[in-house]
Image (tube, grey):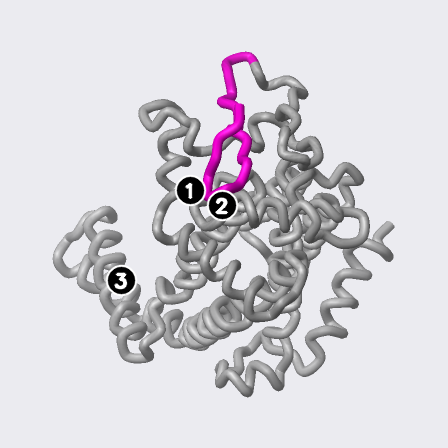
């Protein structure tokens, strides 16, 4: 079905019907464009989803103000730089990572370093408080439950006072997640809108540009990466990030070990997911993951940490990269 919009011929995208989860593909456009290589579920326009149905929440997200802001930012970057779309996506990702997430990551390390430096004082307070509570419990005949409750209540208050004194409450270290994750979602949905023509920002012309705006083995950014090279690279880089974080921690608790295995599983799961979405999204995810790896390594540099005024901690090393390589070699190569 064809419709007229601003003098352009635009095809109406199909609505996904029940039972259409097989390897079905979108119909061939009749405006001279080449056939879409995306599955129907990956290209269905959000405007075709019933607002009251299961896709209502996604329609609301795809047309929300933050997503439209991400679309406008991508269009502005593309217009200002004059780069092809693959370069515009890469430029925007690097710019966002460098201007937003890197400062927040440095602030996160700053807070965590101050919290770590408080641990000896916290342990000293815990010892004295435990002794005082034991004495009072013996004098007043408290039960073990009452004594434990009194200890925990006072310990929580004293530790909170330390966090206020040094302005380093651990919750502040989570600000990176609350900014980075929504930004990643909004950018991903914006690129999905561009790739499927579901955007309200000159969607059809942008979709045409993306179809020829790729490079190397993925010249069409609206199509899947049939070689799986980009998805596999995403999974590999994410796994490297997970292993770098895991190697930094010594004597992980059972919970931390479980979280590490969970994140490893998510990293592997991202490979088949990335193989079923337009290459524009996969390119953004790959650039974002690569910047995350670079950011992780940069924040280990003693000079950079000093530049960001991150306090020295007991666990800091003058040769972090050498130590990281040695730990990796010992764990994965030299073990018998």
Q: Earlier in the sequence, mark 2 or mark 1?
A: 1
Residue plotted at (73% across, 41% down)? 225
Q: Secondary structure at mark 1?
A: helix
Q: In the image as oriented, which residue stretches furthest toward the front?
A: 7
Q: Which residue is mark 2?
A: 189
Q: Earlier in the sequence, mark 3 or mark 2?
A: 3
> Residue 161 or 272: which is nearer the viewer?
272
* Camera-side residue of 275 and 34: 34
Q: Marks 3 and 1: which is nearer the front? A: 1
In the structure shown, which secondary structural element does the residue marked by tag 3 occupy?
A: helix
Q: CA distance from mark 3 to mark 2?
A: 42 Å
Q: Position of residue 249 (x, y in %)?
A: 60, 61
User: In the rendered structure, are the residues bearing label 2 and label 1 in contact, judged by CB atoms less than 8 Å apart?
Assistant: yes
Residue 6 magenta-highlighted: yes
Q: Is residue 206 magenta?
A: no
Region rendered in magenta: 1-19
Q: Nearer the viewer, residue 201 or 283?
A: 201
Q: List the residue tagged with mark 3.
A: 156
Q: Where does the image place residue 210, in percent across and percent down from the top left?
A: 64, 49
**Could you tell whether 235 is left or right of 119 in the image?**
right
Q: Is residue 299 above or below residue 210?
A: below
Residue at image x 19%, y 50%? Answer: 146
Q: Residue furthest left?
A: 140
Residue ID for mark 1: 62
- Callout count: 3
x, y percent for residue 261:
61, 43
Q: Is residue 135 left or right of residue 33?
A: left
Classed neighbour count for the residue bearing mark 3: other residues with Cα under 10 Å, few (<14), some (14–19), many (≥20)? few
Distance from the alpha carbon under mark 3 to that under mark 1: 43 Å
The residue positioned 85% from the left and 55% from the top of the image is 333
């Amino acid at each position: 079905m064809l419709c007229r919009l601003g003098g352009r011929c635009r095809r109406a995208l199909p609505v996904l019907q029940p039972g259409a989860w097989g390897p079905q593909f979108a119909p061939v456009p009749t405006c001279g464009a080449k056939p879409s290589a995306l599955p129907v579920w990956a290209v269905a326009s959000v405007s075709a989803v019933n607002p009251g149905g299961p896709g209502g929440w996604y329609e609301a997200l795809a047309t929300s103000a933050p997503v439209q802001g991400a679309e406008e930012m991508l269009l502005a970057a593309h217009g200002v730089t004059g780069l092809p779309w693959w370069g515009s996506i890469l430029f925007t990702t690097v710019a966002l990572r460098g201007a937003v997430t890197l400062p927040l990551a440095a602030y996160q390390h700053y807070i965590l370093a101050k919290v770590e430096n408080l641990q000896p004082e916290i342990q000293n307070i815990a010892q004295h408080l435990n002794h005082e509570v034991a004495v009072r419990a013996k004098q007043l005949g408290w039960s073990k439950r009452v004594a434990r409750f009194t200890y925990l209540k006072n310990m929580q208050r004293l530790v909170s006072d330390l966090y206020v004194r040094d302005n380093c409450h651990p919750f502040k270290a989570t600000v990176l997640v609350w900014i980075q994750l929504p930004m990643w979602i909004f950018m991903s949905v914006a690129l999905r809108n561009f790739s499927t023509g579901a955007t309200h920002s000159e969607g059809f012309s942008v979709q045409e540009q993306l179809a020829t705006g790729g490079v190397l083995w993925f010249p069409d950014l609206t199509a899947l990466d049939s070689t799986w090279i980009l998805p596999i690279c995403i999974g590999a880089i994410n796994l490297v990030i997970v292993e770098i974080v895991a190697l930094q921690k010594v004597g992980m608790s059972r919970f931390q070990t479980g979280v590490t295995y969970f994140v490893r599983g998510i990293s592997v799961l991202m490979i088949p997911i990335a193989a079923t979405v337009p290459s524009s999204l996969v390119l953004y995810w790959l650039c974002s993951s690569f910047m995350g790896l670079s950011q992780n390594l940069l924040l280990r540099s003693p000079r950079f940490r000093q530049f960001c005024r991150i306090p020295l901690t007991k666990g800091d090393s003058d040769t972090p990269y050498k130590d990281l390589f040695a730990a990796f070699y010992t764990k994965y190569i030299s073990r018998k």
